[in-house]
Image: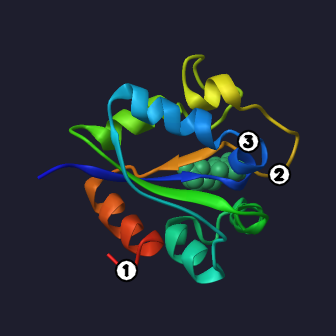
């Protein structure tokens, strides 16, 4: 079965006009974009998506930031795409993410109480299935 992952271009990526640059990295790596939607996240979607972070100090500002503007949800597919996209994205903190990665090349610390780090990618097959169902509930 083809592996799939859920990618979000977060509101900071959309606001900075980086949708195309980010999708280009996914496509030039050789992965396929199967679904794509520009949308405003509902509180229910964010609560479900970030359930594991509820109660952490960065959770309230994270949910606020993710509600600030439209984001792009997409499903990318290809062998190894879950790990492969996380590798393309780079580590969570854009200040130290390696150059050559999305966060390392395009992101930075803006001095805020949340890490605006441009993208999200599922971290496992289980997370991917759960997250794809949150953002593409129609199947
Ligand atoms: P993401 O991959 O979407 O998963 C959780 C998000 O929380 C993460 O990207 C960052 O945007 C944010 N985040 C994680 N750790 C911290 C932190 N220590 N401080 C602020 N924001 C964080």
Locate residue 101: give its quadrant.
top right
Foreground label between 2 and 3: 3
Residue 104: horizontal and vertical position, in percent?
Answer: 63, 25
Secondary structure beneath label 1: loop
Q: Is mark 3 within 8 Å of ligand 1?
A: no
Residue wearing tag 1: 138
Residue occupying the point 43% across, 37% down:
86
Locate residue 133: give its quadrant.
bottom left
> How many marks are shown on the rendered structure?
3
Viewer-side residue, 29 vs 92:
29
Residue 61: horizontal and vertical position, in percent?
Answer: 77, 63
Q: Which quarter of the image is occupied by the C terminus?
A: bottom left
Is residue 112 positioned above or below 51 on the image?
above
Residue wearing tag 2: 113
Residue 120: horizontal and vertical position, in percent?
Answer: 53, 49
Secondary structure beneath label 3: loop
Marks 2/1: CA–CA distance: 34 Å
Secondary structure beneath label 2: loop
Task: Report the side of 37 relative to 28 (left or right).
Answer: right
Mark 2 or mark 1: whose residue is earlier in sequence? 2
Q: Is mark 2 within 8 Å of ligand 1?
A: yes
Residue occupying the point 41% across, 37% down:
85
Residue occupying the point 37% across, 80% down:
138
Q: Is mark 1 within 8 Å of ligand 1?
A: no
**Residue 17, labelled with which disc?**
3
Give the residue furthest to the right.
111
Q: Crowding near pointer 3: few (<14 within 10 Å), some, many (20+)?
A: few
């Amino acid at each position: 079965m083809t592996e799939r992952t859920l990618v979000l271009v977060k509101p900071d990526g959309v606001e900075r006009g980086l949708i195309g640059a980010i999708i280009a990295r996914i496509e030039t790596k050789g992965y396929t974009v199967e679904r794509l939607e520009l949308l405003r996240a509902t509180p229910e979607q964010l609560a479900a998506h970030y359930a594991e972070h509820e109660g952490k100090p960065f959770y309230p500002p994270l949910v606020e930031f993710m509600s600030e503007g439209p984001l792009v949800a997409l499903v990318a597919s290809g062998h190894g795409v879950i790990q492969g996209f996380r590798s393309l994205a780079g580590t969570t903190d854009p200040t130290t993410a390696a150059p050559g990665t999305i966060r390392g090349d395009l992101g930075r610390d803006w001095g805020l109480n949340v890490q605006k780090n441009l993208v999200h990618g599922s971290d496992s097959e289980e997370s991917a299935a759960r997250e794809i169902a949150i953002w593409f509930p129609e199947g």
